[in-house]
Amino acid sequence: MMDLKAVLRTVPGFPKEGVTFIDITTLVRDGHAFREAVRRLLEPFRSQKIDRVVAVESRGFIFGGAIAQELGCGFVPVRKPGKLPAETYSESYELEYGTDTLEIHKDAIDSGQTVLVVDDLLATGGTAVAVLNMLKNFDCKVIGVAFVVELDFLNGRAKIGDIPVHSLVHYDSE
């Protein structure tokens, strides 16, 4: 089995001093590693009916789009403010180093649909919780949240609650 952690690049001091950035571009440029990551992200959810893959701007789009295409289901982008053209729900949240806001179209998910949330990284959990809070506006079932990388030492998983979380690569410390 391919070691996906070995394909990722770490960049100390980015985007600011004291932070080590996990760069997924080295993974997605490698066709075999990218295919393997998509397969593994989907693995625990494949047997479930998924109507929409909800993915977070911007690196989550890479994996979420590939998973939606693999499943033949719809793709829903969660974007930063002012990027979506129709009516949206919005949610502000705390980042590891600041605050931000996300938006989703109000007509993105139909009543009764099942949803898988995808992003590249789980750090403090703020982004994931913001997305899950917005999804409460829909009559949908969130079957899980999938991440390429999880920074275990930041305990973001604990904030997600009882929704299944699946991460491919774990970092225990900075």
Image: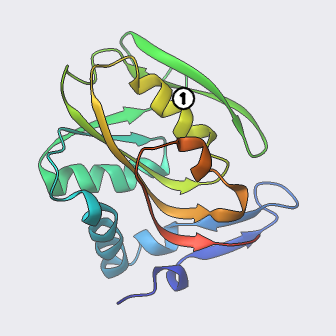
Q: Tell me if residue 65 comes above or below residue 153 in the rendering.
A: above
**In the structure shown, which secondary structural element does the residue marked by tag 1 occupy?**
loop
Q: Nearer the viewer, residue 62 or 68?
A: 68
Going by the image, does 130 lie left or right of 38?
right
* Quarter placement of the C terminus: bottom right
Q: Nearer the viewer, residue 88 or 133?
A: 133
Location of residue 146 in the rendering, given as x and y in whole percent from the top left corner:
41, 55
Give residue 82's position: percent from left, percent from top.
52, 19
Residue beneath label 1, please? 80
Q: Is residue 92 left or right of residue 119?
A: right
Task: Give the quadrant of residue 143.
Answer: top left
Which residue lies most toward the bottom here? 1
Report the residue at 27% width, 16% height from top: 107
Relative to 92, say whether 30 is above or below: below
Which residue is situated farthest in the front direction here?
A: 162
How far across and how far down the image is residue 164, in percent?
A: 40, 51
Question: Is residue 79 at least partly visible in the picture?
Answer: no
Q: Left or right of 150: which side holds 3?
A: left
Amino acid type for the residue under numbered disc 1:
Lys
Crowd rating for badge 1 (residues with CA inside 10 Å; few <14, some 14–19, many 20+): some
Q: In the drawing, does residue 44 fall left or right of residue 3?
A: left
> Who's the residue at 34% across and 14% down the image?
106
User: Residue 129 at what x, y percent from top left?
Assistant: 55, 35
Say if 49 sits above or below 16 in the image.
Answer: above
Total count of labels = 1
